Amino acid sequence: MVDRRSGVPAFRQVAADLREKIASGRFSPGEQLPSERDLVDSYGVSRPTVRDAVNLLRAEGLVTSEHGRGVFVRPPASIRRIARSRLSREARERNRGAFLADAAAQGFTPSTSVKVRFEEADDRVSGYLAIEPGSDVTVRDRVMRADGLVVQLAVSRLPRELTRDTAIEQVDTGVGGTYARLEEAGHRLASFVEHVGARMPTPDEASLLQLADGVPVITVTRVAYREDGSPIEMNDMTLAADRYQLSYEWAAD
């Protein structure tokens, strides 16, 4: 029952109690919450109060509603993005780099839709790629699926002077992907840097990723550098936060 003298709105008290039960495992991932009627009886509050509490949890990404079925606890991230070795030459040679490496490690079937286009570099792109604004860049725009479900959007940009007349400008880049084609052309890769963030999705992103209300996205901007230290590719990735866990490993130097 809620404490009417606490000064805390009743819907927030209900939400806090449900949140604690989800965190403690009393309501497990995928489990349906009690019906609206049961929650009304349990907490001694009105239906609007229960709805406000559930809406708050939905906005936090803790629960999801299914029309005609009820409210369910959102499952934890199901795809583990393992940074270690995912971009190694060995992985590319086995055609198991990046997203394919995640699929091989976790047993889902990957598929990708690719569109290739060309554009002029804006200030942000020119800054990452160390090229002049307005320079031609090749854009590889990808929609990535795990077992048919869209889980990631990725947009790579490269200076067009590096990609002209190569398979990088084709939908299918061949075994090893873009990085293998770059190295075949003499641009040996030396390092990668990833900038990770989080935000709420744009309407287009929410639609493509089929996100429920309140679910944020993880953003990763990866920059690939060749041995002379110059950047040769930037990749803006947008990941569904309820489907991904990012894992990093490094030595304790």
Image (cartoon, grey):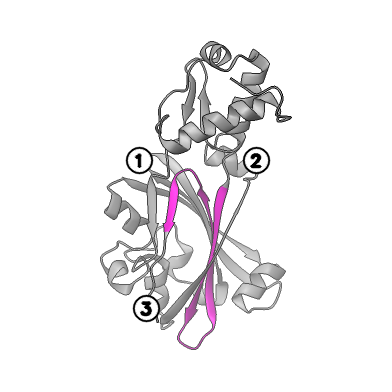
Q: Is residue 144 above or below residue 53?
A: below
Q: Residue at x 63, y 46 (%)?
A: 200
Res. 25 in view: yes
Q: Is residue 239 above or below residue 175?
A: above
Tell me the quadrant of the picture where the C terminus can be found.
Answer: bottom left
| Residue 109, quarter of picture | top left
SS assignment at label 3: helix
Residue 114 in picture, x, y percent from top left:
47, 52
The residue type indicated by label 2 comes to Pro
Which stretch appears magenta? 217-246
Residue 115 in picture, x, y percent from top left:
51, 53
Q: Is residue 221 magenta?
A: yes
The residue type indicated by label 3 comes to Glu
The residue type indicated by label 1 comes to Asp
Q: Is residue 251 above or below residue 72?
A: below
Tell me the quadrant of the picture where the N terminus can be found.
Answer: top right
Q: Do the residues bearing badges 1 and 2 touch, measured as CB atoms within 8 Å?
A: no
Q: Which residue is identified by label 3?
A: 184
The circle drawn on residue 27 is none
Q: Which residue is identified by label 1?
A: 147
Q: Is residue 38 above or below residue 85?
A: above
Q: Between disc 1 and disc 3, whose residue precedes? A: 1
Q: Do the residues bearing badges 1 and 3 touch, measured as CB atoms within 8 Å?
A: no
Using the image as rendered, state which of residue 201 and residue 24 is in the foreground: 24
CA–CA distance in space, label 1 to label 3 = 32 Å
From this viewpoint, which residue is outermost toward the right? Answer: 7
